[in-house]
Image (cartoon, grey):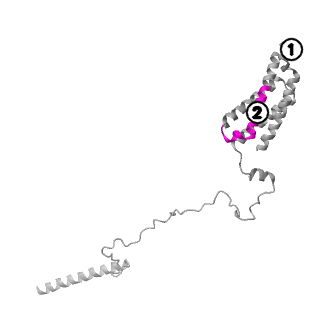
Amino acid sequence: MKKLTVLCLAIILSSTSCFGWGWWKKDKTQNTTPTEVEVEPAGNGYVGKLPDLTKGFKTSEPQSTMPVFEKTKDFNSAEEIKPVPRDNPTFVNIILKQDKTSPYLNDINELLPQLENLLLCIENNDNVQRFNAKAFFFNKSVEYLKDKYEGMPESSYISFKKLLELSTHTKSVATLRAEAEKYRPYLAYSGAGYLYNDNIITQQLEYLKTEIEDTIVVLKEAN
């Protein structure tokens, strides 16, 4: 019985040794030793390698753009700036001249072409209808000027007074010529009909012509 007990104990010990040898051999085939096993520190989370998520992506960086216009070379350089043509009369009289034109001067300047046309009409001995049409237009323009500047400093100007006098004279000559065309066939050249004589009308036109020329000079000097 004692021998049987010793024999069983020997079998158990030999079995345990074989099992331990097999385990050691298995670990050795996997190139792993107890000291080579990574141990995860407690509370540090995952300590392995993560994939590179930024690979394949480009960061958006501001890019400098070139202006669509060409840069002026040395804009403030004296060599690049052309000198002012002060010796050019056109530049001096138009570009550098200060605008001193008043509304009154603008108004009388608009009357100059009308006076020149009326003067040309007398010189060409145009018919009554043509003369009276130009005279009517001129008189209406002077009436507008009178209403606009009456009681103002401009009403004391020589040019203003000259225009009023010329308008009155022009109106009387236009009326004389219109009446002569209307009543001449029925009146003799004596008495009341004498006023509509051709010589009288021609004389009045000459007076008016001289007055128009004088007024044109005054208006131009006012500029």
Name above or below for residue 150 compared with residue 127: below
Magenta residues?
151-172
Q: Nearer the viewer, residue 20 or 187?
A: 187
Q: In the orientation shown, which residue stands out farthest toward the left? A: 1
Q: Residue furthest front?
A: 191
In this rendering, position of residue 12 left or right of residue 71: left
Label 1 sits on residue: 188
Residue 165 shows which numbered tag? 2
Seen in the picture, residue 175 relative to 209 is either above or below; the reply is above
- Front residue (pair 86, 58): 86
- The amino acid beneath tag 1 is Ala
Query: Is residue 164 covered in magenta?
Result: yes
* Quadrant in the picture for the C terminus: top right
Tell me the element at label 2. Answer: helix
Secondary structure mainly formed by the magenta segment: helix
Where is residue 183? Give x, y as percent: 81, 16
Residue located farthest toward the right when viewing the structure as drawn: 199
| Residue 21 marker | none
Task: Tell me which residue sits at (76%, 29%) in the image.
Answer: 168
For residue 118, which quarter of the picture? Answer: top right
